[in-house]
Image (cartoon, rainbow, N blue to C red):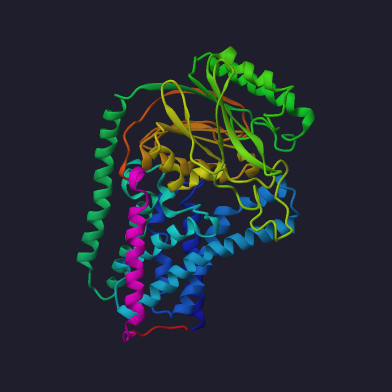
């Protein structure tokens, strides 16, 4: 019995390791197709409590390996003591691991109550939990399984219908089917029907992807072009908010903007909080910034903190401003989805906790979707980790955006895998909405992504970058753009019905070990 327990633990650990290797920076994305098989074997014939423990262990290993950079962000750049930083990481990983633990628990619960094979319901459970994780407690849909396939262009094209959740569904389906095949091998019985169904679904995704990629190219080439310049200032986070360095920061952006202006772009984009001061009040620096679009002849988009006084209270916002070539302000967007404990403190009026970093305050969320307008097009701006929320991004496109811009300051992550993980998620947003996504970061990763999710340009981290490219403006709206997470809702509804059936069904006569 003890040897069996060790085997179960090793299998759970192995699943966690395979999940780590499936995401950036390892990018061994093919491993995700078998990553859950060891976990399925670990919980085979186990009780629900034992299964929860094994699933939770898989979650702890995988999320520690994927999110280790949290310590770098809050300790090295947020000036939080190392012990407290480790505690923050541990609490976050523990919370996220509850989802995989719950998945394992429900998998065994439904099996013991219904006798259904794993492949018939495991994908539904997994996607339901991923969807729940996307909005529960403000949401943190980082490292959804579907994101591991961001380089697998044919496979990810179905996201324009199902969103990222459809990709996760098929990945879990393949894992569950492989488990079923290997499980039945000892009985010399091959589950032909199940394997054929899985093969048809996977093949459908791939065929759709190949056909769609050609179709998208043919349609996009007919759309009007727009030339965009991206600037990555590579401002050191330790001096970013130093008042004595503010002019030097602007000179760096001026130099890089002049360089990219040689390509005659229609729009130049600076990253999040490119002006590390309240631009609306900075009378000494406003002429300097406003003169740049005049000199370059391009619109200028840049990030800046801002504030409003409402009913005697000062409310701060993380904002993006657009300035025209004649130096006039043409629009302002206030970030809607803020980073908890980074940009605001949940229940801050009741809990005496501060924010996590220099230059980050207790911001207020913006109230509305806002698209900036150029003479040729409209575009939406996602600030920092807003790009990881599919439903938020699609709302900009549904409101008329022809392309999406994401501005960020990933210097907080240091030289870790986080900037690459963050960048990879933007590729799925491009596919879901069939729009180009352009990304300007303070220090990596700045780049261009086309409407097929293909990375066209990708800068480095901790380097200055000045790049330009012509994008194509999209005016068509995808199923996902129009209707959102219908696939996830249907999957969640089925999961609830299945769980309800299992609750009222008497336990099958199935032997299992553990509690």
Is any atom of residue 68 visible in this view?
A: yes
Q: Quadrant of residue 43?
A: bottom left
Q: Is residue 497 magenta?
A: yes
Q: Residue 416 versus residue 132: which sits nearer the camera?
A: 132
Instruction: Give the main secondary structure, helix, strand or loop, of the magenta stretch.
Output: helix
- Identify which residue is drawn at 28% across, 42% down: 209
- Identify which residue is drawn at 77% across, 33% down: 242
**Residue sitting farthest toward the right:** 244
User: How far across and down, in percent of the image, does residue 58 sit?
Assistant: 50, 65
Residue 486 located left or right of residue 227: left
**Quick check: 434 above or below 172?**
above
- Identify which residue is drawn at 49% across, 18% down: 265
Is any atom of residue 156 visible in this view?
A: no
User: How far across and down, in percent of the image, does residue 132 sit?
Assistant: 45, 60
Q: Is residue 74 magenta?
A: no
- Identify which residue is drawn at 70% across, 26% down: 249
**Quick check: 415 above or below 193?**
above
**Quick check: 62 above or below 456?**
below
Q: Which residues are magenta?
A: 480-509
- Number of marks: 0
Q: Residue 181 versus residue 405: which sits nearer the camera?
A: 405
Q: Residue 144 versus residue 403: which sits nearer the camera?
A: 403
User: How far across and down, in percent of the image, does residue 512 sit?
Assistant: 39, 83
User: How far across and down, in percent of the image, does residue 214 sit?
Assistant: 26, 33
Residue 52 located left or right of residue 511: right
**Quick check: 118 above or below 21?**
below
**Residue sitting farthest toward the front:** 311
Residue 444 located left or right of residue 505: right
């Amino acid at each position: 019995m003890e040897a069996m327990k060790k085997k179960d633990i090793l299998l759970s650990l192995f699943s966690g390791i395979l999940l780590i290797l499936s995401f950036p920076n390892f990018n061994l994305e093919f491993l995700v197709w078998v990553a859950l098989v060891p976990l399925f074997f670990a919980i085979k014939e186990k009780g629900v409590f034992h299964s929860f423990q094994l699933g939770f262990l898989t979650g702890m290993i995988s999320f520690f390996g994927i999110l280790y950079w949290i310590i770098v962000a809050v300790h090295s750049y947020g000036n939080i003591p190392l012990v407290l930083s480790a505690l923050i990481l541990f609490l976050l990983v523990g919370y996220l691991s509850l989802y995989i633990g719950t998945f394992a628990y429900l998998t065994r619960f439904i099996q013991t109550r219904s006798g259904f094979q794993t492949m018939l319901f495991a994908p539904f459970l997994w996607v339901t939990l991923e969807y729940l994780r996307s909005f529960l407690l403000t949401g943190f849909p980082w490292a959804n399984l579907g994101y591991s396939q961001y380089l697998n262009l044919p496979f990810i094209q179905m996201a324009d219908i199902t969103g990222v959740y459809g990709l996760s569904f098929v990945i879990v389906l393949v894992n569950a089917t492989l488990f079923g095949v290997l499980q039945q091998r000892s009985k010399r019985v091959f589950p032909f029907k199940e394997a054929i169904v899985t093969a048809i679904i996977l093949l459908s995704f791939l065929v759709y992807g190949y056909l769609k990629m050609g179709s998208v190219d043919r349609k996009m080439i007919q759309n009007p072009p727009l030339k965009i310049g991206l600037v990555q200032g590579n401002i050191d986070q330790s001096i970013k908010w130093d008042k004595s360095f503010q002019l030097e920061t602007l000179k760096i952006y001026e130099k890089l903007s002049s360089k990219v202006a040689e390509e005659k772009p229609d729009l130049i984009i600076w990253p999040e909080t490119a002006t590390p001061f309240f631009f609306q009040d900075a009378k000494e620096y406003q002429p300097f910034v406003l003169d740049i679009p005049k000199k370059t002849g391009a619109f200028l988009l840049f990030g800046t903190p801002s504030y409003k006084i409402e009913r005697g209270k000062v409310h701060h916002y993380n904002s993006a401003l657009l300035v025209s070539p004649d130096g006039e302000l043409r629009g302002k967007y206030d970030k809607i989805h803020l980073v908890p404990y980074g940009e605001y403190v949940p229940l801050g009026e009741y809990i005496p906790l501060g924010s996590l970093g220099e230059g980050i305050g207790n911001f207020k969320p913006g109230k509305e979707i806002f698209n900036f307008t150029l003479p040729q097009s409209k575009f939406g701006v996602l600030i920092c980790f807003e790009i990881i929320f599919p439903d938020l991004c699609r709302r900009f496109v549904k409101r008329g955006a022809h392309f999406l811009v994401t501005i960020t300051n990933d210097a907080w992550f240091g030289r870790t895998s986080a900037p690459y993980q963050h960048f990879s998620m933007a590729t799925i947003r491009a596919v879901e909405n069939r729009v180009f996504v352009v990304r300007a970061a303070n220090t990596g990763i700045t780049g261009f992504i086309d409407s097929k999710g293909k990375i066209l340009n990708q800068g480095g981290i901790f380097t200055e970058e000045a790049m330009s490219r012509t994008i194509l403006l999209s005016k068509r709206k995808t199923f996902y753009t129009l209707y959102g997470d219908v696939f996830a809702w249907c999957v969640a509804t089925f999961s609830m019905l299945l769980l309800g059936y299992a609750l009222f069904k008497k336990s099958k006569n199935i032997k299992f070990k553990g509690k």
